[in-house]
Image (cartoon, helix red, strand yellow):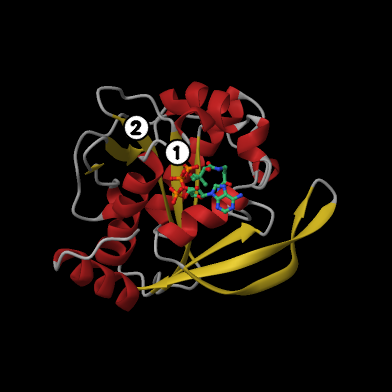
Amino acid sequence: MEKMPYRPELENIRFVQPPVEHAVSSDWREGLPVLTSHHVTMRELRASDAPSLFALLTAEEVSRFISPPPSTVEGFERFIAWTQRQRRAGSYACFAVTLDGSDTAIGIFQLRELEPGFGTAEWGFAIGSPYWGSGAFQEAGELMLDFAFETVGVHRLEARAAVRNGRGNGALRKMGAVQEGRLRKSFLKNGEYLDQMLWTILDEDRKAKKIWESEGGTIH
Ligand SMILES: CC(C)(COP(=O)(O)OP(=O)(O)OC[C@H]1O[C@@H](n2cnc3c(N)ncnc32)[C@H](O)[C@@H]1OP(=O)(O)O)[C@@H](O)C(=O)NCCC(=O)NCCS
């Protein structure tokens, strides 16, 4: 999530209400698919998600180690419009996370290309703190990894987490990410440069994990 590309200060377009998209296209650039698991549904962000995302993602415990989220509901509306433009351009995708029986967005998962063609990409995520430890992150993360590797065709997926961000690093580890190294003083937060850990998942890691799980393997 750190250093994901949206920057509100670069945003000066007028917000236009996008049409609600019900159709699922086979090309994710034309509209994100709806991804479902046991208790979690992931879908394209909508302008109406702005109030819940503002309330949940601007909380201090959520934003402590990530790029500053928009500071108003209107800022989130502009962010959501921006995510849709970037998705249409084919360089970025952002999903809302919703839970069983509710359409309220409780968090987001972002995916952006790091090179043309999406061979190498970066992902980031944030979930409202009332839902931490609930299993929602892991279910949503599995859906996002399938989307990245199987739908988008990512070969190498990177994530950066501030070393001090225990939950963020723990979350990446449990998704099967491998720690590749420490990026010294790579993330400016509140006037201080923080070290980050670089985590990666390769498409071959993901395939091997799936085969292992289908043969009855479990992670303890
Ligand atoms: C990152 C985030 C989406 C993860 O969701 P979550 O529901 O908290 O994640 P989970 O509880 O499923 O997994 C976190 C894991 O880290 C572990 N953990 C918690 N604190 C930890 C710490 N200080 N050090 C190491 N591991 C820690 C948890 O025990 C858990 O592992 P377990 O399920 O095996 O016990 C959520 O915490 C969040 O939104 N954080 C704020 C935004 C953010 O930091 N985003 C990530 C940037 S890389």
Name the residue: 47% across, 61% down. 173
Q: Quadrant of residue 11?
A: top right
| Front-most of residues 31 and 158 | 158
Q: Quadrant of residue 135?
A: top left
Name the residue: 42% across, 56% down. 89
Horizontal side, residue 119 vs residue 23: left or right:
right
| Front-most of residues 212 and 53 | 212
- Residue that carries the numbered disc 2 in the rendered image: 98
Crowdedness near tag 2: few (<14), some (14–19) or many (≥20) residues, C-alpha within 10 Å: many
In the rendering, at what x and y percent does residue 158 appear?
Answer: 50, 67
| Front-most of residues 214 and 151 | 214
Residue lying farthest right?
191
Q: Quadrant of residue 133?
A: top left
Name the residue: 39% across, 37% down. 96
In the rendering, at what x and y percent does residue 151 appear?
Answer: 25, 61
User: In the image, which disc is placed on residue 82?
Assistant: none
- Residue that carries the numbered disc 1 in the rendered image: 133
Q: Secondary structure at mark 2?
A: strand
Whether residue 69 is visible, yes or no, is no
